[in-house]
Image (tube, rainbow, N blue to C red):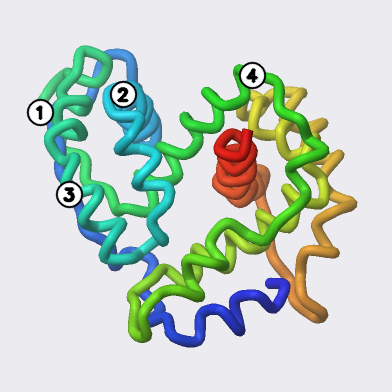
Amino acid sequence: MRGLLSLALVTFVALPTAASAQWTGSRIGSTAKRGNPSEVMQITAECVARRGPGYAFDLMESLPGSEDEFLIIRRNEGDIGNCMDSSDVAVGNWQLSFVARSFRRSLVREMVRVQLRRKVDTSLLASGESWFVEAVAAAPEGTRGDLAYLSYMDFGDCVVASAPQESIELAKSEPESTDERLAVQALVPFLSSCLGQGQELKLSTETLRLAVTEPLYHRIRRIELEN
């Protein structure tokens, strides 16, 4: 997107979008709509974040698509299964399978929601590199990673650094609400500068929300650790 990845990821082995480990849980239901797997995923991620905040922090520090990410998720399969069998999602005998990227996105959305309960000094959000640059540079040659996702995060990190308050407003807004529409409108002037020359990116409101959420988490987390 901004040239960072073309340099930093030369040693990465790009993975296909769905080439992450899958987990299967049972009994989708009452609070989550039976026919809405993304809602079930979100409820499961919220439960996992409450039960194991340390685990959630560790997962978000891992590089997307890496062996470390896979092992961290595997380490917590028990909690994931317990959350999927909780009263919030337990009805019937459906099965839900998901890939690491989907779980990561749902988990970080919940973690940002918790972060934004506190006031964030937006003047501190614009400084520093993308959260993954140092980790990628230190990765051994041949490290497996989700190059497509990191490219997407590179774009989102630029948006957050350029428009921190507007990014926060989008993350705080409810989907399909007036607040969401206004937040997207406020972000539009910043988007083109976060693309390389001649690059184009088709964005829906949901994909823009996904693009800014994890970079926003990492920039807020950096402030939390420094203070």
Q: Quadrant of the N terminus?
A: bottom right
Residue behind mark 1: 93
**Relative depth, front residue between 130 and 224:** 224
**Relative depth, front residue between 64 and 30:** 64
Q: Earlier in the sequence, mark 3 or mark 2?
A: 2
Q: Between tags 3 and 4, which lies in front? A: 4
State whether residue 67 is above or below residue 159. below
How far apart, in angstroms, are the residues tagged by discs 4 and 1? 39 Å
Residue behind mark 4: 118
- Residue shown at 61% from the left, 83% from the top: 6
In the image, residue 29 lies at what x, y percent? 24, 20
Q: Between tags 1 and 2, which lies in front? A: 2
State whether residue 36 is above or below residue 114. below
Question: Answer yes or no: do the residues labelled 2 and 4 have beta carbons within 8 Å?
Answer: no
Q: In the structure shown, which secondary structural element does the residue marked by tag 3 occupy?
A: helix
Q: Between tags 2 and 4, which lies in front? A: 4
- Please state which amino acid type lies under the numbered disc 1: Asn
How far apart, in angstroms, are the residues tagged by discs 1 and 2? 20 Å
- Please state which amino acid type lies under the numbered disc 4: Arg
